[in-house]
Image: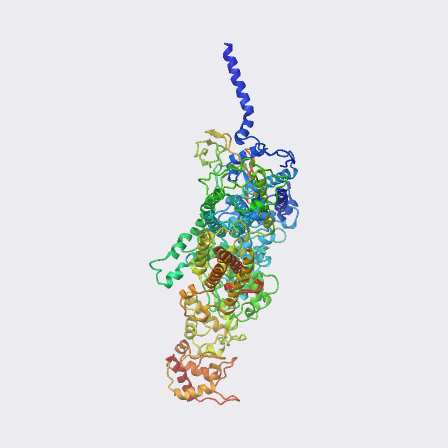
Amino acid sequence: MNKNKHLLLWSSVGVFLLLVVAAWSENSNKEWRRIQKSASNAEGALDIHLRQVVNTNLNSADRCVSCHAGMAPGESELKGHAILAAHKPVVHQPADYGCTICHGGQGRATDKADAHGDVHFWPQPMLPMKYSNAGCGTCHTPLNVPNSDKLASAQQAFERLDCLACHRVGGRGGTLRPGGGGLEGPDLSNVGFKGYDIAWYDKHLAKATAVTEGPWKASFGAIDDVQRQALTTWLNTRVGSSKLVEAKAAFHSVGCMGCHKVSGVGGDAGPDLSRAGEKDPGLLDFKAVPGERNLSNWLKEHFRSPVATVPGSQMPAMGLSEAQIDLLTMYVLSLRRRDLPGSFLPKDRVQVLRFGAREFATDGATIFSAICAGCHGADGKGRRYPGTQAFPSIAGQDFLSLATDEFITETIQQGRPGRKMPGWANEAGLKPEEIQKVVAYLRQLGGNTATKPETTAPRWVKGDANVGQRLFAANCAGCHGAKGEGGEGPALNNKILLATATDTFLIETIKAGRRGTAMQGFESPSPTRAALAARELESIVSFIRTWETKK
Amino acid sequence: MSTPITQEHAALQTFRENLLAAPRRLLDATFRSGKPTTDRTRSTFVFGNVFLHLHAVRTHRWNLRWTTTMGLGIASTAAFLITLITGVLLMFYYKPYPDAAYDSIKDIHFVVPTGRFIRNIHRWAANVMVVAVLLHMARTFYTGAYRKPREFNWLIGMGLLVTTLGLSFTGYLLPWDQLAYWAITIGANIAQSPREVTDALNLTDNFDPGGFQRLLLLGSDVVGDEALIRFYLLHVMILPLALVMLMAVHFWRIRKDGGMVRPVDADQRLAPRSGETYPVFTEAPQKTYQLAAIVKGKTGVVGRGPENTVPSMPHLFYAELAVLMLTVLICVALSLVSDAPLKELANPAVPENPAKAPWYFLGLQEMVAFSAFMGGIGIPGIVLVGLGLIPFLDREEKGTGDWFGGPGGWPLVRRTIPFGFGIAILIEAYVIRFGWLREWFPSIPQLVITLINPGTLLTLAYALYSVWLVRRHNSTRAGALGLFTCFLCGFIVLTIIGTYFRGPNWVFYWSPADWPKH
Amino acid sequence: MTVKAGEPKSRLDPEPVPRRDFLGLAALWAMAGAFLFSLAGMLRLPKAAVLSSPAKKFSVNLPDALADGEAFVPPGRAVALFRDGEGVHAVSLICTHLGCVVKPGPEGFECPCHGSRFKSDGEVVAGPAPRALPWIKVSSKGGAWVVDEDVKVPAGTKEKA
């Protein structure tokens, strides 16, 4: 019996001791307690208890403020640990909205690693501070964002026109004139979201002409249409998150949407990016990614070398600068779009989801750079990535002088089935007027080359297709493929191409070639081959036409 | 005039005395036999207390040897009590609704006072309970305690095993994380696996027990809020009630079936009593304290000289409390070392890979990988039926009450262990290395695979071995010893392979470090 | 439970129990201690460390059109804010009787549960309510008003913008 008594005694003592350890680790050994112990406010030491921001609409309980107590509801000006600092002023009160809705992380957790989400099994870790503006993308999506060039010139216009003398934007400007006189205009940081008086220019001008001196006279004058257009762009993009707008502009500058959809618009060669910022880092392969295992590092490395991070990825390395990669990473991180209660959908998101509003500015330049530039190059001269076929140049004079607006429009609308070029006349594509703008911009890129009017019928060639086949094999198949399937040069057996291209277009193209590309004109001889006669050209065209009916 | 006043005084006086005596009388009323300080009062105390009277007032010295039972029954009960108490505490905060369930577990983990610790204890006690119940069954088997007159209690014990596993399994879904969601998805589809057979026989349209079972379990066609509330109901209400009832019957039957099993020659084999035990009833050897006409089994006393019993209080109670506290100690220690897992929120769009059931089901999951029906229902069914039949097939008496008692004995078991392990490992290794019928003949009918798969072959090999043992030793007990040992070995091998060597897509890996990253 | 050698043993003589069994008592008390300690821990569990309701301190913007003496109840809150020439004050809308939310009316507040009526400064006019509706702390912060439902102030305390 003594054996049992000993067993009972020592088991009980053991249980007691373990319980003491458990009690100690639960009650004393907590980081948030130590932090709150160090804190004091105007009324003395802080009471030590768990703090949280509850938002019943978002179903969130963010206990981040147990450590970041300076941001807890009703706390102000805490002294002590650096972590106790107050939140910088923002549109959405952290004490009402909580923390995780913008910053990500695990709000219910009460220790650092768990709360910041740097743990296994928490799919939405905190956004790095550097990219914290990406958090706005949880609910908002800036609309009408132009490409980086246009955004930069809009900013320049705004600054050059001295608007900052009276207005404040993003914490800059709006200072009173020296000597106490002058005006302070409204803060324009959020006008793109909140809206502004569209008649502002006339009103400003009326005021400026009515006075003879003072800041109105000194800082305001007539503004031409181009610059007013730039100012409109600038104002529309002032939505309280200028870094995110900048990032989105970068996204609209490198043609990502040619292959990727965002909010339902874009090509489908690559994955839909609408929620790419929600990727769970736990499901990603970090083998090729240096640095910490987080989504932003993964994205950056992915931009540098897509194939290394995602084996089998078809995405070429775009040759982006580190600054561009930084911006694109922020933008992709902002594609989070958490499922929110309807009352939390802001109007910009509603416009996109319900009314088909464009997230990109709908001028030709932005559409071209957002959609076309990835393959055809920002200058329209075509691009070539390692391991892929070359993409055709479409802004050359040789092409534009032959291609009618109808031809280009048709090509954009229908695409080139079987090739990378998708058709854009569909739900995920462009509206007719947008395509027109792209065509006009293309002409502008090509130095405003006009098309030579065609006087001939669309189909007038009557060559010998058999002769043409021989000639094609000898002269064309090297680049265009034996069956016209394309290679170095574009595919020629494409039904859409053959339906839209006239005989004259084809003949003239062969004759003159495309300067700036591998396509030499066949009108004149080159050191390696003889010129082709008119009848031979016609035979080749006749041969090419045989693909129109064949499978 | 004065008389009534005096009477009034007297009544008040009595009232005062009664009031003062109330605490003492409460004690008297509670412990009717007075302070349990002597052997006799203790006996009455044990006898008269609803909780203690599950015990006999006197316990045979054989029962108190640590090797007799190893306290496994008490450990199982203790683990159940721990899960019961911690489970009720967790119910303060747990909300059985998808998403809210997950958030409430997060809250229990992070902000509920003692919540994380209580949840850890609950989880570890549940695991300890499964282990203890399995070991308790093994002890009962190896000591031959299932034999007449304890056949029925053996069946009750199997019911307790199944209920325990059911409790553990239903608790698995409640956190509503990925682990839970996908383990239950698999579990529900195992319930549906009779379709494997009905499909093959083209019966499913008219006769679909599998689909019915799954629907009954999930309440819907997917694992969703309906399934969660059902699992919750099973976990906190139906199964615990069933378990408590089965336990009551189980304990009662221990008494009614003649107490703990012990060898016929236990009295001779016990060491002579030491000074600390006290001989009783020596003057009345004809005494019985069983109603022989009603209670089955031999009385422990008649015509057999001095009893080898000691008072249950305190001898047995010290032993029981010691095992109880040891169980608590193990659970608490494990809880401090390791947190109960909680993965990301359940996401029906992203399957866990690999999705693993609780460890004690991984042996089944390993067999399910060969054939859902055979692994999930067929073989476990055969095993359960076999276990249930053992006491009715083995009617021998030799060796009852001894570890590995009966023909063959320990040498047989010792020789069986390498065989049981070996053949399981051999079959597994063969399948992992060379694949199975489907890989060789892709067009083979499913029914063939259902019938001939590594799981059924293993079962068959074990069965043949045991038949051979029966012939060789001319004893059913020998066959049973071999078969039970074999299945125990097979369970261990399959569980270990399922736990440590299976990775994404249930592919074999030497270590989780080799798992491909997705 | 020891018996001295040579002593007569009879079933009629109960087994003597030793007075002091130090080991046994220590074991039992250790067990009791462990259980009591764990009981204390378990009893802490039901008391929630954080409440699942939003913070009692919140900020509110008063509508410009709010008239003198007109109550403004922020949505989802049980507080009425008033603005007059002397400043802004807030009155709790939780009935002091049994906690129903009172309704602001033209002449004060009325409780729908047991018919208590209060003047607009919170004083009880009729019904079972034992105390006046308390005034709640309001402070001005950058154009908005911060209300702290947990802090009561003496009736008549008004806060200037």
* Closer to us: A303 or A179: A303
Quarter-of-image position of residue B371: bottom left
Say whether residue A331 is visible. Answer: no
Does A546 sit above or below residue A315?
Answer: below
Q: Residue furthest front?
A: B303
Q: Position of residue B115 (x, y in %)?
A: 56, 46
* Closer to us: A529 or A18: A18
| Residue positioned 39% across, 61% down in the render | B197
Colouring convention used in this rendered image of the protein: rainbow
Horizontal side of A19 relative to B87 (left or right) equals right
Does B157 sit above or below residue B306?
Answer: below
Q: Position of residue A260 (x, y in %)?
A: 48, 66
Q: Position of residue A514 (x, y in %)?
A: 49, 80
Q: Position of residue B390 (x, y in %)?
A: 46, 53
Say whether residue C125 is visible. Answer: yes
* Closer to us: C115 or A523: C115
* Closer to us: B373 or B349: B373
Q: Residue furthest top?
A: B1
Exactly how many numbered labels are in the figure? Answer: 0
